[in-house]
Image: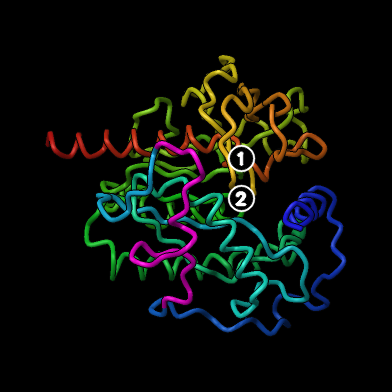
Amino acid sequence: MRRIFFYLVTISALFGLFSCSPSSSFENTVHPEAPDYSAEKYWIALPWRVDSGDSVPPGCELGENQKNAQVDVFYVHPTLYVMGRNWNASLSDKSLNSNCDKCIKIQASVFNACGRVFAPRYRQALLKSFFDSAEGPKAIGFAYEDVKAAFQYYLDHWNKGRPIIIAGHSQGARHVQQLLSDFFDGTDLQKQLVAAYPIGMPISKTAFKHIPLGDSATQTNCFITWNTFAWGTDVGIRNNLYRGAACVNPLTWKTNDTYAPSTLNSGGVPSPFNRIDKGVCDAQIHQGLLWIHSPDARGYFELKGFYHLFDVNLFYVNLRKNALDRTSAFLNKQGAQ
């Protein structure tokens, strides 16, 4: 059932096949009730609570360490609202909330070895929003206002000056990019930024004035991103949306086009979250895309060259270790000052 759900997401994303779509404009839509982030039910993951953000895949040598972590992680989940009659999701949808919980388990958990994980629920934009140039930006902007409110609540009540990793995937990466612009880029808060990981969304190399694209495994105060495609995929996919986009190779943490063999892949974790697949794929940057050959394990499917659903999972262990490395580098730098 889970595989079918992810398959439908991919089909919808690539071909725009929406069996249920809003019948009215964004302005004429009755929007779902807004979240109150002082209530824990509007958070998928909080570090003092047992939840999906605490998960660790079987056999992982880098355990969960939120109790002792010196940094915080703010994670924004991707689009899981695939079919619906509203432009933005209701936070009372139990089935959707369950899928969001599972997503945090297989994505945001990658950071629980290095930091305390905070992941808000938000009235995410319907997937169709990313294919509708008239109404879509309004729904995406509406969703961002929730993410912004959640982040502000986190800052006001829980951060207390701690270093921050900010991360997200797909729609979540879109919102993280905006958070970086609104809260970090050239501000005092940027001094607390360990690193940002807005993964799975094309972002310009010069998206920020003061936050550079990372080009080493221990660089801090930077952003790291990639978009995963099958080897040989034409850069013109999606009307050149990805041409020249920022891209960091998660097997080398460099921005050059040097080939990284699968031996550098410490392990992917498939969506059932039941194993670690060492050497699951290689990686090479090609004109803004991250090319990989077909994964050497079941559970990481592609459609028309698109591995978007597994941007994080194909490199799970490498990313987990890298977040620890950047955290150590940041804390060491702070200690030296």
* Residue 64 versus residue 279 in the image, above or below: below
Please, what secondary structure does the residue beneath circle 1 have?
loop
Q: How is the rendered protein coloured?
A: rainbow
State the image coordinates of residue 72 (x, y, percent, origin top left): 33, 54
Closer-to-camera residue (314/22):
314
* Residue 269 versus residue 179 in the image, above or below: above
Q: State which tag comes first along the sequence, 2 or 1.
A: 2
Which residue in the structure is indicated by mark 2? 170
The quadrant of the picture occupied by the C terminus is: top left
Closer-to-camera residue (107/125):
107
Tell me the amino acid under the disc marked 2. Ser
**Residue displayed at 55% across by 43% down:** 199
State the image coordinates of residue 83 (x, y, percent, origin top left): 78, 67
* Residue 255 versus residue 116 in the image, above or below: above
| Start-end of magenta stretch | 40-61
Question: Of discs 2 and 1, which sits in the foreground?
Answer: 1
Which residue in the structure is indicated by mark 1? 311
Q: Residues within 10 Å of mark 2 (few under 14, many from 20)?
A: many
State the image coordinates of residue 312 (x, y, percent, origin top left): 57, 41
